[in-house]
Structures are given as structure tokens and as C-alpha cells.
């Protein structure tokens, strides 16, 4: 049991689990991926690019990403309502990871 505790601390596995919770699931990493290739997107544009995501799922995932500090939500007080989403600095710091995934996809023609 001692070696397991050592692994958890030495390799930061507990922190890794925290990150997995922040970007895990079916949609969060997809949202980050799309925003990494677009500076700012409105809600409708995100929904269209992430089809077939439901309104409820997109809304829930964006709220989670916002809460975790990865995505910024900017609401404009106008009619019709306008809401834009962009990666925060913390989210943008994931761009190299996302771009490496993109290169991997191209390399293996996936």
C-alpha cells in the first residue's frame, strides 16, 4: 500500500484525476478543441459545430468549464441576446495539447 501512496504523490495522480474531471466526459474536451481553433464563438455556432449535442448538454458542459476556469462566458445586454464563449488563459494553455491531438489525427489519418 505504501508504494501506491508514493505513486499517487510522486506522479501527481490525484491532480491528474482532478484534470480528468475538469476536461473529461463526452463533450468538454470537444468544446475545448473547437474553441482552440476559434478565438470566440457564439452559443449557436458552438452548438452547430458540436452537432448532435443537445441544448441542455451544451449548456451544462459550458457552465462546468466556466466554473473550472477554462472557458469565459460573455453576455451582451441586447435584444436578441448575444452570448460569446472563449477559452480563458488557463484554457488556452491546453491548446498545445489539443493541437498535438490534431497532429496525431492527421498523422494517422483518423
Image: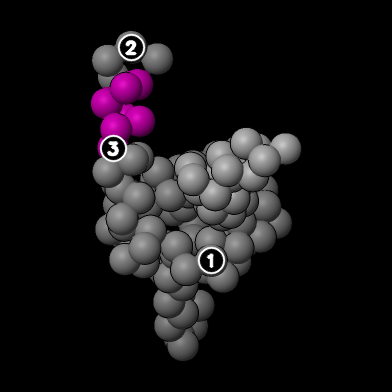
Q: Position of residue 61 (x, y in %)?
A: 61, 56
- Judge whether residue 13 can be spotted in this image: yes
Mark 3 and mark 2 lie on one chain; the one further toward the N terminus is: 3
Residue drawn 49% across the image and 57% down it: 44
Tell me the tag on residue 83. none
Task: Report the colour scheme.
Answer: one colour
- Give whichever of 48, 23 is nearer the camera: 23
Residue drawn 64% across the image and 44% down it: 5
Tell me the tag on residue 68. 1
Callouts 3 and 1 close, C-beta under 8 Å? no
Residue extending farthest top: 108
Q: Position of residue 3 (x, y in %)?
A: 62, 36
Structural distance between the alpha carbons of marks 3 and 1: 21 Å
Give the magenta range: 99-105
Q: Position of residue 4 (x, y in %)?
A: 65, 37
- Give whichever of 82, 86 is nearer the camera: 86
Residue drawn 66% across the image and 60% down it: 60
Structural distance between the alpha carbons of marks 2 and 1: 32 Å
Q: Residues within 10 Å of mark 1 (few under 14, many from 20)?
A: some
Query: Mark 2 — residue?
Result: 108
Mark 3 and mark 1 lie on one chain; the one further toward the N terminus is: 1
Tell me the tag on residue 99. 3
Callouts 3 and 2 close, C-beta under 8 Å? no
Structural distance between the alpha carbons of marks 3 and 2: 14 Å
Amino acid at each position: 500500500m505504501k508504494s501506491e501512496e508514493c505513486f499517487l504523490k510522486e506522479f501527481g495522480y490525484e491532480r491528474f484525476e482532478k484534470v480528468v474531471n475538469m476536461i473529461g466526459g463526452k463533450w468538454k474536451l470537444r468544446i475545448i478543441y473547437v474553441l482552440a481553433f476559434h478565438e470566440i464563438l457564439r452559443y449557436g455556432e458552438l452548438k452547430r459545430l458540436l452537432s448532435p449535442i443537445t441544448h441542455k448538454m451544451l449548456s451544462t458542459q459550458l457552465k462546468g468549464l466556466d466554473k473550472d476556469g477554462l472557458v469565459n462566458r460573455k453576455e451582451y445586454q441586447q435584444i436578441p441576446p448575444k452570448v460569446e464563449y472563449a477559452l480563458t488563459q488557463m484554457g488556452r494553455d491546453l491548446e498545445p495539447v489539443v493541437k498535438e491531438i490534431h497532429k496525431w489525427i492527421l498523422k494517422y489519418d483518423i
